[in-house]
Image (tube, rainbow, N blue to C red):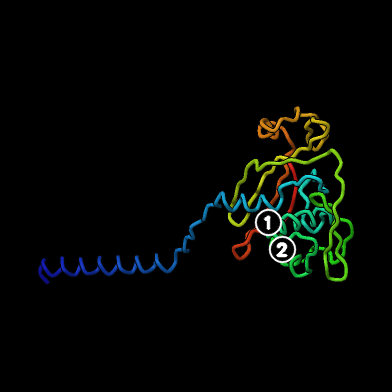
């Protein structure tokens, strides 16, 4: 065998080896899935379901609490925020409208089938006999305020931080009743930086973020 044939055979063997290597790498290496950054618009939309409202029952949580262990008032508060977002809050609300909104924020059925005189945004709401009805009530002088403070995500988890405080007698207090400033609408954004940070933890399931737990920082 002459030198030229040896070189040709050697080159053929190298090419075959390279082809085998490439095929092996394609079949053995895991497929890398690109991670999508959570859009700010998505977080803003979620914030609408936890944003505090004037003249509304609001419960804060000092430690991380799973949705299964949340108070009924907290569950209703988030559902009613979603209903407000869905524009179904009116004098009479059907059970179906209530359930559709509830299913957008909670992955499992946690919402009550009956409740009476739940206070939300200046109204008492009562669910009985498959219909929600409301009546206007007089609010006290304590009003809650909030703002979207920040957020972070990892894989299918999303954390949304909300700064919360309340206003009473023209003074602003955090949820531990510590005074953090004088009420001034122009300064509220800065004052809320000193408010209590409520942490809302979500999980992504089938392209929808469901609330999983609430805590604080």
Cα distance between the residues tagged 2 and 1: 9 Å
Q: Is residue 15 above or below residue 37?
A: below
Foreground: disc 2 or disc 1 = 1
Residue behind mark 1: 85
Residue 160 shows up from this direction: yes
Residue behind mark 2: 101
Residue furthest out toward the top: 182
Q: Secondary structure at mark 2?
A: helix
Residue 217 shows up from this direction: no
Q: Residue at x 82, y 35 (%)?
A: 176
Q: Is residue 39 above or below residue 127?
A: above
Q: Secondary structure at mark 1?
A: helix
Q: Is residue 86 above or below residue 187?
A: below
Q: Residue at x 30, y 68 (%)?
A: 19
Disc ID at residue 42: none
**Which image quarter holds the N terminus?**
bottom left
Whether the residues at callouts 2 and 1 have beta carbons within 8 Å, the answer is: yes
Q: Is residue 78 above or below residue 3?
A: above
Q: Nearer the viewer, residue 36 or 114?
A: 114
Q: Position of residue 107 (x, y in %)?
A: 71, 64
Q: Residue at x 70, y 53 (%)?
A: 49
Residue 177's image quarter?
A: top right
Q: Nearer the viewer, residue 214 or 148?
A: 148
């Amino acid at each position: 065998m002459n030198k030229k044939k040896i070189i040709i055979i050697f080159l053929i063997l190298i090419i075959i080896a390279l082809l085998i290597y490439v095929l092996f790498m394609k079949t053995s290496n895991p497929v890398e899935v690109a991670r999508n950054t959570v859009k700010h618009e998505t977080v803003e939309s979620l914030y609408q379901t936890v944003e505090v409202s004037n003249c509304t029952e609001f419960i804060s949580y000092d430690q991380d609490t799973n949705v299964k262990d949340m108070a009924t008032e907290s569950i209703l508060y988030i559902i009613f925020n979603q209903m407000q977002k869905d524009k179904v809050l009116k004098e009479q609300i059907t059970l179906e409208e209530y359930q559709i909104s509830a299913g957008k924020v909670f992955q499992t059925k946690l919402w009550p089938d009956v409740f009476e005189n739940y206070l939300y945004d200046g109204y008492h709401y009562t669910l009985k006999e498959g219909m929600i009805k409301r009546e206007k009530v007089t609010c006290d002088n304590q009003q809650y305020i909030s703002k979207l403070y920040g957020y972070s995500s990892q894989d299918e988890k999303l954390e949304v931080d909300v700064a919360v405080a309340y206003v009473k007698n023209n003074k602003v207090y955090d949820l531990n009743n510590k005074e953090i400033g004088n009420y001034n609408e122009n300064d509220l954004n800065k004052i809320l930086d000193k408010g209590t940070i409520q942490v809302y933890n979500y999980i992504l399931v089938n392209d929808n973020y469901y609330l999983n737990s609430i805590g604080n920082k």
